[in-house]
Image (cartoon, helix red, strand yellow):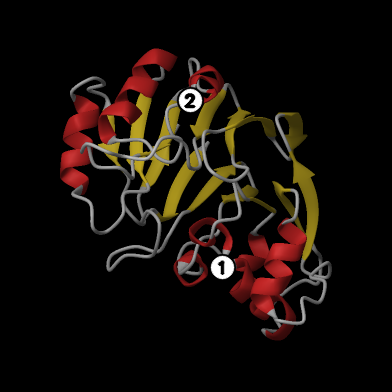
């Protein structure tokens, strides 16, 4: 399994990275985890969009889904699409949310995306065994575990401290964990993790490696990583364009 970081900036695109988008590949199958604002441009540097086999949206905040709109433009007007509707797995209402984002008339996008609503559960997607769990976030959001070829990757999406995310990540080879909150007093609950909390989740789950991601441009990423390593030394900081082999 191969993970390529297309975008990893938290909450909004930053000066060095688009918002959340991760390419996971096994064999010839290419799956996008999230498609946040700014990500479609960067995606084209690592993969021809015609080779996207499926899209998984953890939730419907703009920094995780909004670049579905330029994907629609590419699909309909570039002359490069093969015409198939790309399977998309997303929380209930994604079809309406993305249609409204693309056009104020909200016309259907079913020529571009074949949307399957998700909830907590398990299914097979190409070579991947997929399991999802609801996270601690103000809107419906699902962390996802992908297993293929005896390897497993867990992506938290957005979450505050969550026992469900720890259980989902139990024994995974790699945990891709958000760490958007600096460790300061008065943080809202059920929204994001601090760097230390990301490390604590990795340690509690007994994962092999931790990749800290979704750090906003206004938060000190090096400090987030240092805080994570204080409790889980096998931590790295996600970098745009980074490739990680599992």
Residue 132 percent across, percent down from the top left:
64, 31
Residue 89, image x, y percentages: 72, 48
Residue 25, horizontal then vertical, whole percent: 57, 44
- C-alpha separation, residue under disc 2 versus residue under disc 1: 28 Å
- The answer to whether residue 64 is above or below residue 148 is below
* Residue displayed at 56% across by 68% down: 67
Q: Quadrant of residue 130?
A: top right
On screen, residue 54 versus residue 192, left or right, reads right
Question: Which quadrant would residue 102 be assigned to in this image?
Answer: bottom right
Of the numbered discs 2 and 1, the one sitting upstream in the chain is 1
Give the residue drawn at x 24%, y 42%: 182
Q: Is residue 133 above or below residue 126?
A: above
Answer few, some or many: residues within 10 Å of disc 1's Cα (few below 14, many 20 plus, some between 14 and 19): many
Residue at image point 43% right, 34% down: 160
Q: Secondary structure at mark 1?
A: loop
**Which residue is at the front of the view, 89 or 98?**
98
Q: Is residue 212 left or right of residue 109?
A: left
Q: Quadrant of the C terminus?
A: top left
Horizontal relation, residue 30 to residue 22: left or right: right
* Direction from residue 195 to residue 91 in the image, left or right: right
Which residue carries the number 2 mark?
162
Q: Could you say which disc has been placed on residue 67 in the image?
A: 1
Tag 2 secondary structure: loop
Q: Determine the residue positioned at 66% across, 80% down.
A: 73
Q: Is residue 211 above or below residue 100?
A: above
Residue 46 percent across, percent down from the top left? 47, 62
Question: In front: 100, or 198?
Answer: 100
Q: Nearer the viewer, residue 148 or 8?
A: 8
Residue 222, which numbered label?
none
Mark 2 or mark 1, whichever is nearer to me: 2
Q: Nearer the viewer, residue 4 or 71?
A: 71
């Amino acid at each position: 399994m191969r993970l390529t970081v297309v975008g990893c900036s938290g909450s909004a695109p930053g000066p060095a990275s688009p918002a959340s988008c991760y390419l996971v590949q096994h064999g010839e199958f290419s799956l996008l985890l999230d498609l946040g604002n700014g990500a479609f441009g960067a995606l084209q540097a690592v993969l021809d969009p015609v080779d996207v086999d499926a899209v998984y949206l953890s939730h419907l905040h703009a920094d995780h889904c909004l670049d579905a709109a330029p994907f629609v433009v590419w699909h309909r007007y570039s002359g490069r699409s093969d015409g198939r509707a790309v399977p998309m797995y997303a929380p209930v209402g994604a079809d309406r949310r993305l249609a409204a984002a693309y056009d104020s008339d909200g016309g259907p996008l079913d020529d571009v995306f074949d949307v399957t609503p998700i909830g907590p559960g398990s299914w097979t997607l190409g070579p991947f065994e997929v399991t999802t769990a609801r996270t601690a976030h103000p809107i419906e959001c699902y962390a996802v575990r992908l297993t293929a070829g005896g390897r497993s990757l867990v992506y938290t999406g957005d979450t505050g401290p969550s026992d469900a995310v720890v259980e989902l990540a139990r024994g995974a080879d790699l945990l891709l964990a958000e760490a958007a909150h600096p460790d300061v007093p008065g943080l809202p609950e059920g929204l994001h993790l601090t760097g230390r909390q990301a490390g604590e989740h990795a340690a509690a789950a007994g994962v092999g490696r931790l990749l800290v991601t979704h750090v906003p441009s206004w938060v000190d990423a090096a400090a987030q990583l240092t805080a994570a390593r204080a409790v889980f030394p096998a931590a790295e900081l996600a970098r745009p364009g980074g490739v990680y082999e599992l």
